[in-house]
Image (spheres, rainbow, N blue to C red):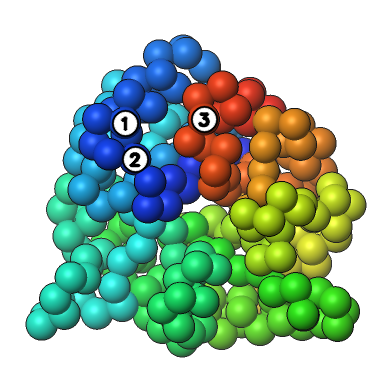
Amino acid sequence: MRKQIAAANWKMNCTYQQAENLLDEILGAGIGLGAQQEVVFAVPFPYLIMANSEVADETNYFVAAQNCYNKKSGAYTGEVSAEMLQSIKVPYCVLGHSERREYFQESNQMLAEKIDRCLENDISPIFCCGEPLQVREAGTQNSFVETQLRESLFHLPAASITRIVIAYEPIWAIGTGKTASAAQAQEMHAHMRSILAKQYGPMLANNISILYGGSVKAANAKELFSCPDVDGGLVGGASLQTEEFKTIIKSLK
């Protein structure tokens, strides 16, 4: 069975003390995870070492960076390299979130380079993709998302693509209160898996986790995660609320 993942994307939220308290509350709930289940906390850079220490004794709880740079090192003031993340033993890194694409103009090519930097440093990318409202309204979301996958991931050999976790985020459903229906989520996830199958074969495609990332809440997590091609969620605002995120974790297949 594919990994079922509840990934918390804290974005630019929480002071150090708030972050520590939130982790303590969630971990203190003692939610046991199955062998194929994982919880990942994507925390701001200043909290990575603390968060890694918090989850160190937990089974299948991990930490992720929210971004890294596409260069190995150099005169890039303010940036963080994959090598730096590897040196503090960060196992995951979120790449290509819609906010990075929109606010920082990250291209598919830049993201392909970031993917490579992470894999070179034994970090598993959580690669985000998804369409804005105008693309969905035009009915061209399938080709839009296929282009994102092809231009950022399909240079990878089969051995490397298995390290990737994909997160589908319909941009029109992020922070808007709107959510893709379970049927819409399943339709896109199945389409993405079919694209992966054409490139890498069905066996490999069936082993890649595809998360849903559009306003996942306690109220809709169970229905979304029950879809056959939805392998958990990349959770924004609800991951900052202890009870909400605990319920989401418990909703994993």
Kindly indicate the quadrant of the structure image that contains residue 199. Answer: bottom right
Q: Which mark is residue 18?
A: 1
Q: How crowded is mark 2: few (under 14 residues within 10 Å), some or many (20 or more)?
A: some
- How far apart, in angstroms, are the residues tagged by discs 2 and 1? 5 Å
Identity of the amino acid at label 3? Answer: Gln
- How far apart, in angstroms, are the residues tagged by discs 3 and 2? 11 Å
From the top left corner, tell me how far across and down residue 167 is, in percent.
Answer: 60, 58
Identity of the amino acid at label 2? Answer: Cys
State yes or no: discs 1 and 3 in contact (Cβ < 8 Å): no
Please indicate, yes or no, whether residue 247 appears anywhere in the rendered image.
yes
From the top left corner, tell me how far across and down residue 175 is, in percent.
Answer: 62, 54
Residue indicated by mark 3? 241
Residue at 37%, 52% in the rendered image: 12
Q: Which quadrant would the C terminus be assigned to in this image?
A: top right
Circle 3 — which element?
loop
Tell me: 239 left or right of 173.
left
Viewer-closest of 158 and 4: 4
Residue indicated by mark 2? 14
Q: Which of the marked residues, 3 or 2, is nearer the chain's N terminus? A: 2
